[in-house]
Image (cartoon, grey):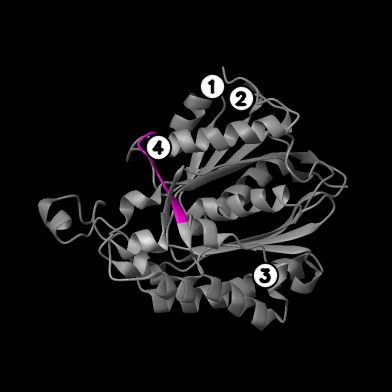
């Protein structure tokens, strides 16, 4: 049987600070009922002074390595999905690699909310070719820094988080079965930060016009997301000789409950087939799917031998999906009996 990339370790980190809908109502013209009815979000986690993109990623990675029974020295490759780096240069992956004490190559994938599935597929390729045996795939976003808290169309949606998995070779059928990656750059300005790049560098004008914050055309993103989520699920399951109904659990990008409900109706699937935790965290961008995956494992919603469909959409505008069969190492609650290895 061919070699596949199996998920053998998993971990997460969320900041201590909770920002509720009631808190936001003190900051911008909104209220709990308005936010909940339109998004399904009740609260989100926001960085504290001790949190950076690097520290959050390291915390999640240490947990994932502990579950897999590995140390940082065992890692052959680190792939980080991130669009909110500590600095413009260097890339997040380099700083995370050093902070972990790893000596392997490290790279960053910037594909917005689709980023972690892109990173998962990238890591999987290195496993399948035999180039590497232990790949750490991280999704981390400290996206609150790019939010305009006078704009209720965006500031209510996002939160900060990190989650990670370890990939290792498997020849018993577990691992990444199929995937789809996509992009439509013609729609890019529906979800973007117009200032701060090389076209419109940071300046007093950019700051005065608040162009260094995320801007979104919610209606267009909603239409794109509902179409891509359902089509992508059909495509990736079709590649595996299945249908979306064959999946034991679907882990969608946690952006908006209405989008997930629409997908469930379109696919004629019960809503409980979809794992949902956006009410607690909001949209954590590239951390969204791995964070949901970790919690699904911890809650026993994802078990050994089951098949999960993961699908995301985001800036770019991009989309990505993967069908993954869980191996025998998946069990509820992670591995509490294992101490986290010391990071050199």
Which mark sits nearer the N-terminus, 3 or 4? 4
> Residue at the spot x=43%, y=74% of the render?
33
Is residue 116 found left or right of 24 in the rendered image?
A: right
Q: CA distance from mark 2 to mark 3?
A: 34 Å
Which residue is label 3 attached to? Answer: 233
Q: CA distance from mark 3 to mark 1?
A: 38 Å
Check disc 4: other Cα within 10 Å, few if <14, some if 14-19, many if 20+: some
Q: Which mark is residue 101?
A: 1
Is residue 229 found left or right of 88 in the rendered image?
A: right
Check disc 1: other Cα within 10 Å, few if <14, some if 14-19, many if 20+: some
Q: Which residues are magenta?
A: 44-50
The secondary structure type at the circle numbered 4 is loop
Check disc 2: other Cα within 10 Å, few if <14, some if 14-19, many if 20+: many
Q: Which of pointers 3 and 4 indicates the residue nearer the eye?
A: 4
Residue 304 place in picture, x, y as percent: 83, 49
Which mark sits nearer the N-terminus, 4 or 2? 4
- Check whether the beta carbons of the residues at disc 3 and disc 4 lie within 8 A of each other: no
Q: CA distance from mark 3 to mark 4?
A: 33 Å
Which residue is label 2 attached to? Answer: 72
Residue 310 place in picture, x, y as percent: 65, 60
Q: Which mark is residue 52?
A: 4
- Check whether the beta carbons of the residues at disc 2 and disc 1 lie within 8 A of each other: yes
Q: Which of pointers 4 and 2 indicates the residue nearer the eye?
A: 4
- Check whether the beta carbons of the residues at disc 2 and disc 3 lie within 8 A of each other: no
Which mark sits nearer the N-terminus, 2 or 3? 2
> Residue at the spot x=48%, y=32% of the render?
96
Which mark sits nearer the N-terminus, 3 or 1? 1
Report whether residue 55 is seen.
yes
- Inspect the magenta stretch and tell me whether residue 47 lies in it: yes
Q: CA distance from mark 4 to mark 2?
A: 20 Å
The secondary structure type at the circle numbered 3 is helix
């Amino acid at each position: 049987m061919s070699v596949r990339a199996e998920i053998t370790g998993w971990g997460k980190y969320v900041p201590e600070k909770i920002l509720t809908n009631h808190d936001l109502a003190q900051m911008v013209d909104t209220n709990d009922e308005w936010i909940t009815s339109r998004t399904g979000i009740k609260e989100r986690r926001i960085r504290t002074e001790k949190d950076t993109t690097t520290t959050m990623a390291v915390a999640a990675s240490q947990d994932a390595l502990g579950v897999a029974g590995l140390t940082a020295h065992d890692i052959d490759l680190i792939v980080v999905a991130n669009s909110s780096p500590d600095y413009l240069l260097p890339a997040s992956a380099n700083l995370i690699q050093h902070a972990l004490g790893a000596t392997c190559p490290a790279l960053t994938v910037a594909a917005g909310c689709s980023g972690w599935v892109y990173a998962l597929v990238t890591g999987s390729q290195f496993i399948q070719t035999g180039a590497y045996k232990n790949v750490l795939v991280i999704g981390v976003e400290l996206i609150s820094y790019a939010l305009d808290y006078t704009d209720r169309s965006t500031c209510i949606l996002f939160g900060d988080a990190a989650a990670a998995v370890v990939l290792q070779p498997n020849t018993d059928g577990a691992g990444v079965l199929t995937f789809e990656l996509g992009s439509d750059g013609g729609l890019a300005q529906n979800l973007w930060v117009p200032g701060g790049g090389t076209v419109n560098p940071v300046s007093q004008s950019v700051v005065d016009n608040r162009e260094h914050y995320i801007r979104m055309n919610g209606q267009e993103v909603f239409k794109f997301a509902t179409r891509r989520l359902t089509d992508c699920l059909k495509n990736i399951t079709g590649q595996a000789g299945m249908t979306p109904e064959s999946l034991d659990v679907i882990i969608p990008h946690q952006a908006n409950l209405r989008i997930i409900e629409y997908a469930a109706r379109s696919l004629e699937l019960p809503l409980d087939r979809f794992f949902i935790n956006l009410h607690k965290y909001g949209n954590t961008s590239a951390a969204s799917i791995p964070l949901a995956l970790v919690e699904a494992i911890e809650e026993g919603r994802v078990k050994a031998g089951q098949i999960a469909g993961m699908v995301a959409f985001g800036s770019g505008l991009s989309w990505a999906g993967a069908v993954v069969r869980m191996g025998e190492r998946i069990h509820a609650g992670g591995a509490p009996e294992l101490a986290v290895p010391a990071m050199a």
